[in-house]
Image: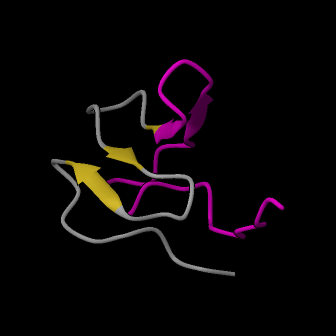
Amino acid sequence: MGRTERVCAVCPHLGGVLRWNDAEDSWDCPLHGSRFTAAGTLLEGPATTDLRRL
């Protein structure tokens, strides 16, 4: 069974609106390339924190 995660879709780096990347199963920021897992864990920066959980 799957699991639902609720995270804020705004990048903590500079406030870019994240886009879901189906190919990588990640949240990606179009401004500077930060990437996050479906659960909001930071994969790569320049962001330095995970996404805020809702």
Q: Is residue 6 magenta?
A: yes
**In the rendered image of this protein, does residue 13 appear above or below residue 22?**
below
Q: Position of residue 26 (x, y in %)?
A: 49, 39
Where is residue 20? Give x, y as percent.
Answer: 62, 33
Residue extending furthest toward the top:
23
The verdict on residue 25 being magenta is yes
Q: Is residue 39 above or below residue 34?
A: below
Quarter of the image with the C terminus is bottom right
Pick whichever, 9 or 31, lies toward us.
9
In this rendering, position of residue 7 left or right of residue 37: right
Quarter of the rendering occupied by the N terminus: bottom right
Magenta region: 1-27
- In this rendering, the answer to whether 17 lies above or below 31 is below
Magenta segment's dominant SS is: loop
| Residue at the image position 18 percent from the left and 48 percent from the top | 45
Q: Is residue 3 left or right of residue 50?
A: right
Residue found at the far bottom of this picture: 54
